[in-house]
Amino acid sequence: MQEKELNGRKIGGLVLLIILFIYAAAIYGFIRGIIRMDAGGKAGIFPLCVLWMALGWILLIGLKVLAPQEALVLTLFGKYVGTLKGPGFFWVNPFCTAVNPAAKTKLNQSGDVDSNKKGLSLNLQGAGQAEVEMASKKISLKIMTLNNSRQKINDCLGNPVEIGIAVIWRVKDTAKAVFDVDNYKEFLSLQCDSALRNIVRLYPYDVAPNVDTTGDGVADEGSLRGSSEVVAERIRSEIQSKVEIAGLEIVEARITYLAYAPEIAAVMLQRQQASAIIDARKMIVDGAVGMVEMALERLDEKGTVQLDDERKAAMVSNLLVVLCGNHDAQPVVNSGSLY
């Protein structure tokens, strides 16, 4: 169903003045009719004045007030007649009914759908109660944020990770949002959960060998931790493809929380520490070997000491122990001959 915007209905102020004027005239005619009947004259328009005073208030129900970035979807006896948009004072058929199935649904900061809250409960009578009920049927066209709750999902290597996203969205087509899905807010929340699971399962938490995250058959370096922008964009595109039917636009999606699940967090931390230690040791060994090579080359160039292969091996061993050790070296001075 396509949205149909109702234009030319910003005549609420004029209609209100006309109704009030007719009410004033009806009250005047009502009083004059009573006076004439008391004097034995004809009732004249007295019955019309009574009828208007009894039923004229029905036209007031057709007055609608909308603030900026608000919309009202109207139906007449079950048929969609159009949508009021933009700020203004409108007047429509008083028998039109505003429809918004998600009016009482609250998307909390955590992203959970709270359907137990029944909205505003006030003991008002007449037009005041109708206005409160009408206000709850308005659809916000503002950009809104859904903070999705953290989920535990297995990455492509089977490691459980906890991840949360923030989705920035807005209603683009009010007719689709109201009529094509049962509750567009619940629909959005569920689709965010599903899209998040579908995308996270394609990536490892950290860079892993022989993993294809793009689907082109070639291993790449994509990861949840290192490719957060790419992952967020794929999540946004996935959600958008699912909620298009509901007339919603996904402006942006961002990862707000990412960590290993508690049950493996300690083990993965040890693994990261071990990997860091190995990388550091590799760098130390490469540097030590370079320094030993430089020392031997300098000794050969200067001719300071003539060393055979056995003494060179001993010297290399001693230098590597000193340069690669975790603690400061405690040298032993040999006061005798080398040979």
Image (cartoon, grey):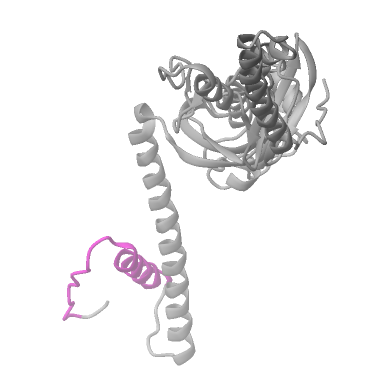
- Residue 295 in picture, x, y percent from top left: 42, 79
Image quadrant holding the N terminus, namely top right
Q: Which residue is drawn at 47% across and 78% down?
A: 294
Q: Which residue is drawn at the image coordinates 35% and 40% (left, top)?
A: 270
Quarter that holds the C terminus: bottom left
- 177 vs 335, nearest the viewer: 177
Q: Quadrant of residue 224?
A: top right
Q: Which residue is drawn at 53% across and 44% down?
A: 225
Q: Is residue 16 left or right of residue 333?
A: right
Q: Is residue 208 magenta?
A: no
User: Which stretch did the figure color magenta?
Assistant: 309-336
Q: Quadrant of residue 233?
A: top right
Res. 98 in view: no
Does 74 appear above or below 264?
Answer: above
299 or 51: which is nearer to us? 51
Residue 203 visible? The answer is: yes
